[in-house]
Image: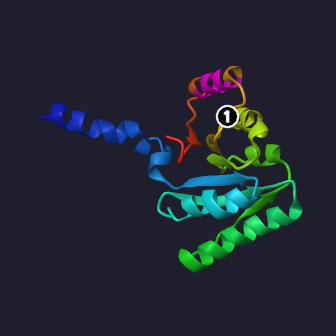
Amino acid sequence: MKSMLAAGSAPMLFNGCATGFLACRKINIGVVGFGRIAHSMDVPLTIKYTDRCRFTAVCDLDAKRRAYGAKFIRDWYAKNADETAEVREYADYHEMFADPSIDAVMLCVPDHWHAILATDAILAGKHIWLQKPFTQTIKEGRILADLAKKYNRVVQVGSWQRS
């Protein structure tokens, strides 16, 4: 009986609950780039999962887009989630990636930036969601996939309408 109970509880212990891994708390997300696609598709499709995640940071080189993104997120939480949201703003993605409170990043940048930012995010310990294409070349893709495996990071590529 003891071994059956131990075996039955193993999934709860090893899925992260015993160690405080992401399975037991909301995932803090930072978004890099707050242009048309981030505003109209990527963030709205994700932000509604308030039981699983929370947007806590916006990074964009353009100060107007950055401020707009932070306001968009704050206003959404105030209207739809009955909570206030502290949304930090960054002009440099390196600074955002250095924030230990951010678990994952949503990369909403032009295609030629995907591999560069994804590599930096993995090396900073972040999980990643990015738009297609994953990378510009097969070699970049292999490097990125190998890094994700080496550092045990989740990388998801949004490829709806294509598969």
**Whole-percent x, y for residue 41 in the image:** 62, 60
From the viewer's perspective, is 20 left or right of 75? left
**Whole-percent x, y for residue 144 in the image:** 66, 27
Q: Please identify the quarter of the rendering in which residue 66 is found.
A: bottom right
| Circle 1 SS class | helix
From the viewer's perspective, is 7 left or right of 161? left
The quadrant of the picture occupied by the N terminus is top left
Q: Please identify the quarter of the rendering in which residue 119 is found.
A: top right
**Identity of the residue drawn at 81% across and 43% down:** 94
Can residue 98 be seen at all in this image of the molecule? Answer: no
**Whole-percent x, y for residue 113 in the image:** 78, 39
From the viewer's perspective, is 66 left or right of 132? right
Q: Say if the magenta span includes residue 145.
A: yes
Q: Main secondary structure of the magenta part?
A: helix
Per the rendered image, the range of residues in magenta is: 140-148
The residue identified by callout 1 is 122
Q: Say if the magenta span includes residue 133.
A: no
Q: Is the residue 17 above or below the residue 115 in the image?
A: below
**Whole-percent x, y for residue 51 in the image:** 47, 62
Q: Is the residue 89 above or below the residue 76 in the image?
A: above
**Identity of the residue drawn at 77% across and 45% down:** 110
Give the colouring mode of the picture: rainbow
Tag 1: Cα neighbours inside 10 Å, few (<14), some, or many (≥20)? many
